[in-house]
Amino acid sequence: MSATTENLTRKGQVIRSAAELFREKGYAAASMRDLAQKLGIEAASLYSHIKSKEEILQSLCFDMATEFRKSLDAVEKQQVSASEKLKNGIIGHIQVMAKDLTSSAVFMNEHRHLSQPFLRDFLLLRINYINRFKSIIEEGVRKGEFKSNIDKKLAVMTLFSSLNWMPMWYDPNSNIDSISLGQQLADMLVNGLKKSN
Amino acid sequence: MSATTENLTRKGQVIRSAAELFREKGYAAASMRDLAQKLGIEAASLYSHIKSKEEILQSLCFDMATEFRKSLDAVEKQQVSASEKLKNGIIGHIQVMAKDLTSSAVFMNEHRHLSQPFLRDFLLLRINYINRFKSIIEEGVRKGEFKSNIDKKLAVMTLFSSLNWMPMWYDPNSNIDSISLGQQLADMLVNGLKKSN
DNA sequence: CCTACCGATCGGTAGG
DNA sequence: CCTACCGATCGGTAGG
């Protein structure tokens, strides 16, 4: 029930509507006039709430990035095996996405329309996040939990591919909730890495 | 060595340059003037080779779809176990993408800009392709090759997520060629499905 | 939040 | 493949 438009500031409502529009049509194809119409106002009126079209994209992308980072922070503090850490990292990632599938889709598909220096900053955050997952995988290999002959880059990219497409097909009204989705996904991916004996 | 612009018709060169541009900037943000500049001609001159901007997108998307279909056709004819079939399907899919990473990226990220009825047709082709993979997974479950408690939709969507993001991170100049990439990916995904004993 | 408007750029056509 | 051009639409501003 998080995606209602009530109990948001007007600016928050503008950003939420924009997220839906960016997801639907893509950032470049979504016009400020489309957005205004969705909100029942004139296009020019949008600019009393936001500075520019791109400012909206910036807040969507960087807010999601912050959520992902916080989720991984918590997982890294856990005193558990590498495979447990990886599983929990996956579950956390899925949960963050499930909390806001619309923003997640924008985060994933539209970030490339950020201008510099925002694009550079965004990509740095992303590579840092991926590298933290890669470290968990490396830890698992060192400790003998994961196969030693896996290509770590391939493994981590496959992992993120699976995670990041979830907003494209997951139906929040389906009978599988986001936690067990995360668990099943983690199970499927981790068991593909784990030694089979 | 496939992505050279030589030994193509002029129309083919236009489409290839457009693919690169669409990949880089996204379909909506790529202008016909950008494309003309890339080719060293005036924007208006493009229209002696192509009917419209969207016609280019259509040929890119549907040509890739045909390649994927043909690859799967060949795999389905094989008299092998379901897990072998799945592996070979994955390897084939990766090979088709590796043959043209640029068009693959456009196929994946830009197809939504197709107008009707092309968009509908495209999505039907895609769902059909996915369902054929799902049938292979179901066959594997029936025959006891795969775990019986897997969520088949989740499994097939995770599979395609992993495959479809490959053009975003795979470096064709890296020391891993597309065939062994496909094999490793297949191994990683299938072993996540297979019974462990 | 509105009216009125701007300069830039868009996909595409006419006619060579 | 070019010059010349069109109507539509874009993000955004001025001034209330």
Image (cartoon, coloured by chain):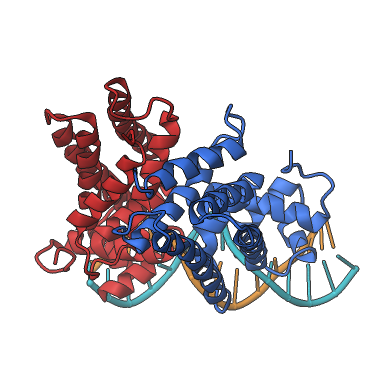
Chain colours: A blue, B red, C orange, D cyan
- Quadrant placement of the C terminus of chain A: top left
Q: Say which quarter of the image contains residue A5.
A: top right
Residue B177 showing in the rendered view: yes
- Quadrant placement of the N terminus of chain A: top right
Nearer to me, A96 or C11 = A96
Nearer to me, A21 or B88 = B88
Residue ID at (27%, 46%): B186
Nearer to me, B109 or B56 = B109
Q: How many marks?
A: 0
Residue ID at (20%, 45%): B92
Image position of A129 (left or right of C6)? left
Q: Position of residue B183 (x, y in %)?
A: 22, 50
Q: Is residue B16 above or below residue B152?
A: below
Q: Say which quarter of the image contains residue B148.
A: top left
Q: Position of residue B96 (x, y in %)?
A: 21, 50
Q: Position of residue A186 (x, y in %)?
A: 49, 44
Residue A22 showing in the rendered view: no
Nearer to me, B195 or A67 = B195
